[in-house]
């Protein structure tokens, strides 16, 4: 979809993704090698009572789920920023995540492009676990 096809307040819901312990550990080994993502025994003794996903992993999955909806397709040019990132609740192995995406702003930049900003709110069942704003440069 092009910038002009989106309306402020428009809402989309993504498919879901079930996160495994192996997914969490594979991501963490490469991008966030902290004990709460990798060491089951130490994680059990911590505040979350077990392995949890990295917040960066949750954010990446939220983005993936939105992009897989195919709304931008070839009209997107590039991401421009992410703001107000909030890791609200821990994500555990076996959690099934889905993202609600709300169009919160659109701004024409040049005759043929503009900036679209969406709010990504990711849930495990009905509990919000992540929230963040994503802006992209997109064809008008």
Image (spheres, rainbow, N blue to C red):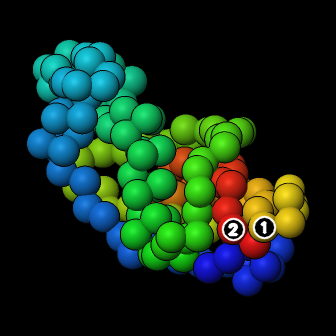
Residue drawn at (49%, 72%), measured in percent from left and top? 73
User: Dot 1, crowdedness within 10 Å: few (<14), some or many (≥20)?
Assistant: few
* First-in-chain label (2 vs 1): 1
Q: Is residue 13 in view from this perspective?
A: yes
Is 51 rendered above or below residue 108? above
Q: Tell me the residue that label 2 is attached to.
A: 139
Q: Are marks 2 and 1 in contact (CB under 8 Å)?
A: yes
In what element is the residue under mark 1?
loop
Residue drawn at (78%, 67%), measured in percent from left and top? 112
Residue 76 picture location, percent across and down: 58, 63
Residue drawn at (51%, 49%), measured in percent from left and top? 129
Residue lying farthest bottom?
A: 5
Label tally: 2
Q: Nearer the viewer, residue 47 or 18?
A: 18
Q: Tell me the residue that label 1 is attached to.
A: 112
In what element is the residue under mark 2?
strand
User: Dot 2, crowdedness within 10 Å: few (<14), some or many (≥20)?
Assistant: many
Residue 30 picture location, percent across and down: 22, 25
Q: Nearer the viewer, residue 98 or 108?
A: 108
Q: Looking at the rendering, in which quadrant would you find the N terminus?
A: bottom right
Residue 15 picture location, percent across and down: 39, 75
Residue drawn at (30%, 45%), measured in percent from left and top? 92
Is 121 rendered above or below residue 41? below
Report the side of 86 relative to 94 (left or right).
right
Residue 17 is drawn in which quadrant? Answer: bottom left
Report the side of 77 relative to 115 (left or right).
left
């Amino acid at each position: 979809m092009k910038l002009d096809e989106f309306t402020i307040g428009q809402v989309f819901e993504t498919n879901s993704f079930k996160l495994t312990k192996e997914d969490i550990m594979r991501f963490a080994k490469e991008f966030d090698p902290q004990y709460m993502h990798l060491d089951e025994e130490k994680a059990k003794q911590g505040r979350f009572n077990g392995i949890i996903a990295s917040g960066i992993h949750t954010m990446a999955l939220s983005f993936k789920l939105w992009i897989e909806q195919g709304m931008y397709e070839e009209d997107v040019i590039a991401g421009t920023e992410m703001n107000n990132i909030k890791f609200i609740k821990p994500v555990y192995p076996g959690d099934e995540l889905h993202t609600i995406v709300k169009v919160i702003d659109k701004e024409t930049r040049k005759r043929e492009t503009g900036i679209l900003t969406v709010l990504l709110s990711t849930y495990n069942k009905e509990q919000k676990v992540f929230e963040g704003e994503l802006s992209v440069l997109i064809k008008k």
